[in-house]
Image: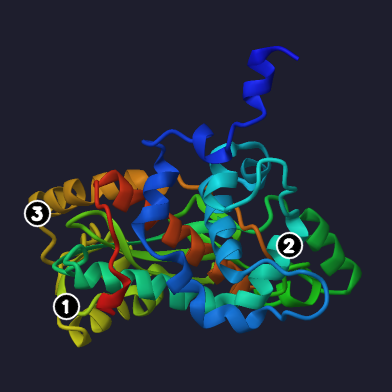
Amino acid sequence: MSKRHQHSLFLSLDSLVPDHHPYRHLDQLMSFSELSAPYKSFYSTKGRKEREVEFGLRALVLQFMEDERYLQENTAGKWFCDLALGEKSPDHSYFGDFRKRLGTTGLMTIFNHVRESLKGMGFIREVFTFVDASQLVSKLTTWDDRDKAIQAGLEKFNNETACKVAADTQARFGCKGNQKCWYGYKEHVSVDMQRGLINKVAATSAEKTDAEGLAHVCPKGGAVFGDKGFCVDPAQRILKRKGCHDATIKRHTMKGKDRRQDGWLSAMRSPYERVFAHRNKRVRYRGLKKVQFQVGIRALVFNLKRVMALGIHTIDLRLV
């Protein structure tokens, strides 16, 4: 065997990941063991060997940062999840089982823990908040469900009959304006405009209006920058109840509309709208609770990416 081949036998996984790699930064950013500690009871020490909750949380974050294959094929991904170079990566069934054990409540608790830590460090202040709602498509075509409705003797396939024939019984038809219609859910989000970090996120069925969804993501005070969907009730009542300044764009038919002011408000919203307009609109799971899990882990990953881009070295989880 040549000297070159002999030397390659002693390569470690750590030596294959550059010192400046983003996942080294992510590994140092916060304590994954501290975040996962409350959920260690999910895994029993009896029976087949189970991976720890920390591994599952790391793998889940990596899955939404990249994809499932990344952990199988990338050395940095294996290093981040503490897998050996030749160790087999978990398949899709592992992720499904882990999501089920952690649950939507557990995932949103983790998201809120990180969010409150960022608040304690002064990176989320709720002084200026961008709010928006976007479509989440459960099914691109609904012809099969319409045919099922006809066969079942139903006159129409709509929000009243969807629960009787659709595979996803909690999805609904939603519309935004006169042209944008879809079948699925809606993602509501509020973003702190100081550093572009997601403050709150929620999923609803698609027929809920932007104004109704504000109840789930409205900040506790400050100026709220919303589009025309938030200039009506119940959003206006929610803003008053929360003590927020109304910085929403008015509709063309509303009294007191100031086109110059609304143009400025639109310009303020524009950088954040571009970011969220290009996100994946497809639903990965069925059911509102699982869709909430999707938007929750996606928001957590978004914040982690944003924190790394801002050059923040540590999230102090003890500040909660």
Q: Which of the marked residues, 3 or 2, is nearer the chain's N terminus?
A: 2
Badge 1 density bin: few <14, some 14–19, many ≥20, Cα 10 Å? some
Q: Amino acid at mark 2?
A: Tyr
Q: Which of the marked residues, 1 or 3, is nearer the chain's N terminus?
A: 1
Q: Amino acid at mark 3?
A: Gln
Quick check: 25 above or below 182?
above
Q: Quadrant of the N terminus?
A: top right
Q: Which of the marked residues, 1 or 2, is nearer the chain's N terminus?
A: 2
Alpha carbon separation for disc pair 1 and 2: 41 Å
Give the number of the disc on residue 116. none
Give the number of the disc on residue 94. 2
> Mark 1 sits on what residue?
221
Q: Amino acid at mark 1?
A: Gly
Provide residue 153's location: percent of width, then percent of height. 88, 74
Provide residue 158's location: percent of width, then percent of height. 68, 69
Q: Nearer the viewer, residue 189 or 177?
A: 189
Q: Nearer the viewer, mark 1 or mark 2?
A: 2
> Mark 3 sits on what residue?
261
Residue, far bottom: 241
Quick check: 263 above or below 241?
above
Residue, far right: 151
Provide residue 114's location: percent of width, then percent of height. 35, 69
Q: Quadrant of the C terminus?
A: bottom left
Query: Is residue 158 visible in the rendered structure shown here?
Result: no
Position of 222 with respect to 76 (left or right) is left
Disc 3, SS? helix
Query: Is residue 243 visible in the rendered structure shown here?
Result: yes
Disc 1, SS? loop
Alpha carbon separation for disc pair 1 and 3: 21 Å
